[in-house]
Amino acid sequence: MMIKKNATSRKLIKAFFSGKIEQIRSGSPRERGQALVITAVAFMAMLAFAGLVTDAGTLYLNFARLKRGLDAAAIAAANQIRDSSLPAAQRKALIRESAREMLMLNDIDDIYSLETYICDDAGIPADFASICPGPGEIKRKLAWIQASQNSPVYFLHLFGVETIPITTHSIGEAASLDVVIVIDTSESMASETDIDPADGVSDYTPDYDPTNCNASNTCQPLRDAKDAAKAMVDKFFDGYDRIAVVTYDVKAAIHDPDLATSDVLEADHTAVKSTIDAIQLFDGPAPADVLVFGDPRYGEVNPMDADGDGVYFEDKDIFGSTCTGCGIRVAGDILKAQGRVDSVWIIVFLSDGTTNVSDLPDASDPHNPVPAGYVNGFCGGSIGGRLWTNEPGTPYSWCTDSDPATRHCGPFHADASECPAGSIWVGNSTPPNDTEDYARDMTDRVALVYPLYPGDSPEPKSGDEIAIYAIGLGQAARPPDYDGEQLLRYMANIGDDNFRNPVPDDPTDAYPPDPCDGAAPQTSCGQYYYAPSGAYLTQIFEKVAGSIFTRITQ
């Protein structure tokens, strides 16, 4: 079709000039002169038109190229609005240099003006001000990038015009963060308190009273965990990124920095850090308090109700104190209820031990999934039964079967067809369902989007795209079974890409292996981080923050 149009155009031009030439030949000298002038003017007009079209096309192409480059530059610049601990001038320089670097990567290096603004700047363009949040509204990580460039022209060059300035802008927005920091406050988080410098031995014992260290904020490694968490909060952008704080021991607790509103995700980071500072250690029962009812080491009492009165969560009643499933469930509930749809949802989860408690039935909590018949949660059993025993000299822990490689499938699945791959269908029986099975089920409930890779599966799908970073501290990776670490690695696996990578890896499938598959115990891998002691936590929380920033720029 284009060839036909060009041929037609050539014929029309040829006919036009042929007609003019014939008029010149056949006319009088005066007519021939007029015809020559008209022909010359027409020819010059056509040349001018062609030249202007060429220059206009060049301007359009250069404008489009500049606009595409600015679109990329605006996104790159917006991603620098992340670390509120940097001075404003340094952050502004990073935004500007990031934009300039992206323009150069798009072969745009001849700009003569580059302007960058964020919503907090003074004198921002009116068009930008119109989309920036007003006072009292949730802040957004917006960046305005405007550039000017001299575009060369060719026809107009004949008239002394060498270039024409072109100016355009673009607005980029980086994802804001909704983060839930989950901290273990079980009594073992005082295991490094009052260490004698002479022998390196802590004063901590199973009947340790944390009253004094709670009052002086010296319970260790809990203090190290709080300091590390606060340092990570400083990496996030105050006023833009929202943070909630959850602790867990025998149950999970939400710490709301601002009791004036129902939202527990808080953008005021000063309030968040004050909330973290106020976290206190759980005080569990001393052995002497329980021995009057029977020896809990040999399963002579119910570990969830030591005095057997049927009332739970009384003082000195439950002697397991690490409800991992409670912590991850509540963190997920917060994000699903209050997380912004356009933000990145993150859970940073710290534990120092093996899970040995689960949620108990609670009709007042609409998010609690434990069936009413599970009066002891997932620590069912009987006197002398395995889940009620923590025999000295064995790897046993209350309320778990101490077999992290085996997963049972039960009350959160209608039948065996809905079970996770490799699990054992046991229905609604506990035992063998235990607190570790509950923690894995709650992890799936929070973040599992694709049960069997990205594909069809009858397994329940209630997870959301939530990233989970799991930190195992000290005894969480205790040999010989490394129960706590294996659970935390499972959480990090699910929270990495929201589908369950098989372990061991199936080399015939098209999906990447679990980053922790084959990793040695007590080592970091993927989104799981191992801290031998509290002294390592600050650098680990910094690594987690860096990984989060990498995630939001991808």
Image (cartoon, helix red, strand yellow):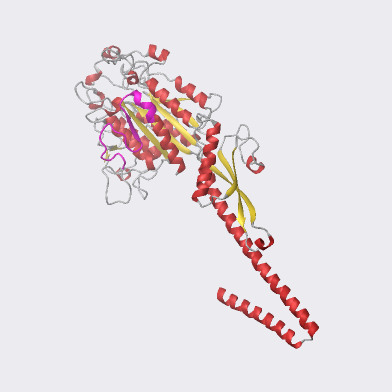
Q: Is residue 165 visible?
A: yes
Label count reads 0
Q: Is residue 386 above or below residue 454?
A: above
Q: Residue furthest bottom?
A: 26
Q: Give the percent coordinates (x, y) of residue 495.
A: 38, 39
For image coordinates 38% across by 34% down, the residue present is: 469
For image coordinates 53% across by 44% down, the residue present is: 99
Residue 45 in the magenta stretch? The answer is: no
Q: Residue furthest left?
A: 393
| Left or right of 143 on screen, residue 455 | left
- Quarter of the figure that contains the C terminus: top left
- State which quadrant residue 310 falls in: top left
Q: Give the percent coordinates (x, y) of residue 527.
A: 36, 37
Of 353 and 413, nearer the camera is 353
| Left or right of 77 on screen, residue 397 | left
Of 22 and 367, nearer the camera is 22
> Magenta segment range?
514-540
Q: Is residue 326 visible?
A: no
Q: Give the percent coordinates (x, y) of residue 357.
A: 33, 26
Q: Is residue 70 above or below residue 377?
A: below
Residue 522 in the magenta stretch? The answer is: yes
| Left or right of 196 on screen, residue 546 | right
